[in-house]
Image (cartoon, grey):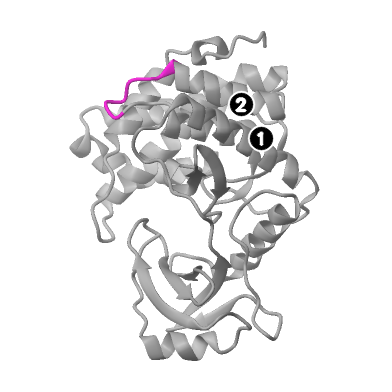
Amino acid sequence: MAVYTHISAAELDAFWRDFDLPALTGFIGINEGTENSNYRIETETGPYILTLYEKRTKVEELPFFIALMQHLAGKNITCPQPVAARDGVALRHLAGRPALVTTFLPGQSVLRGIMPEHCYELGRALASMHLAVADFAPTRRNALDLAGWGELVAACADGADGVISGLRTTLLHELELLTASWPAALPRGIIHADLFPDNVFFRDGKLSGLIDFYFACSDAYAYDLAICLNAWCFEDHVAFNITKARQLLRGYHAVRPLNADELSALPLLCRGAALRFLLTRLYDVLHPKGGKPRDPRDYLKRLNFHQQVRAVSEYGLEIEA
């Protein structure tokens, strides 16, 4: 979340008249995030979220994301709900941007002080989401799959060593290995693909909702789990926390048991997830678009750790694959 497109009170007031919603009392920009402009809208009965989609968002894909959030809510997965205007259409326009009003989720992200119990709750919620999308018909290609990694490597290879010495060779070798061995027959469906701590809300110690589904796509469920393991189970100094990983995997496995193929593939999937975020962070360093890019070194260290892992037991899950 962030604010790139600014709106006036008069613009918002005119926009709000299209909805059967409580009267406005105020609004404020939400500064966290990197992709779209977001506002917290205050009304007489409580807050809503307004998102303005910026130029990087493909407008033709927005109906997919809206339908996904509606489907998940129908399966008791707590996530923002798109609010339709009086004409029945949720996707609008404001300040020259596609715009969407969604319900507000109580709670807050745990960006510091992540505990093993948070990871357990996350694992259960992620597994519940994967079960909930089993009958969701729409699909969306993962633009950051193996083919996408190849495109990023090509775009970053020449400048990689200027960021981290020896990185070019690491990227080329890792991409070659993953291309040759990436599992193709794992259970799959719609995944979140970006379930970092800032996209998960907690309230009174319990997970209260999932947000930001704009990277959601069709891929292996276990790959979504690998993304979470990378995002939640390493400390600030990039040391692996096996206690957090154990709880994340136990929580997931308790709701949606991982099959033998998924368990065997998890170390490779974790390598792929680490490479994916290493590449996008490296790309942003080499092709800056404003703001301070995130350091790719953190995900290089994660990748180096996963390269040494041979079995899921090294992540703390003591189940035979």
Judge from the rendering whether residue 71 lies leftward or rightward of residue 18; answer left or right: right
Q: Is residue 213 above or below residue 257?
A: below
Name the residue tied to disc 2.
251
Residue plotted at (55% across, 28% down): 120
The answer to which of 137 and 46 lies nearer the viewer is 46
Nearer-the-camera pick, 157 or 291: 291
Q: Tell me which numbered mark, 2 or 1, is placed earlier along the sequence.
A: 1
Tell me where residue 305 appears, x and y as whole percent. 38, 18
Which portion, as a residue range, is magenta? 236-242
Q: Which residue is found at the position 60% from the left and 54% from the top? A: 79
What is the spatial separation of the Cα atoms under label 2 and label 1, in whole angstroms?
8 Å
User: Pointers 2 and 1 in contact (CB under 8 A)?
Assistant: yes
Q: Is residue 207 above or below residue 92?
A: above
Front-lying residue, 90 or 47: 47
Q: Which quadrant, please, contains the N terminus?
A: bottom left
The disc at residue 228 is none
Q: Nearer the viewer, residue 228 or 172?
A: 228
Q: Quadrant of residue 100?
A: bottom right
As drawn, the label of residue 127 is: 1
What predominant SS class does the magenta segment belong to?
Answer: loop
| Label 1 crowd bin: few (<14), some (14–19), many (20+), radius 10 Å | many
Amino acid on which disc 1 is placed: Ala
SS at badge 1? helix
Residue drawn 67% across the image and 42% down it = 129
Q: Amino acid at mark 2?
A: Gly
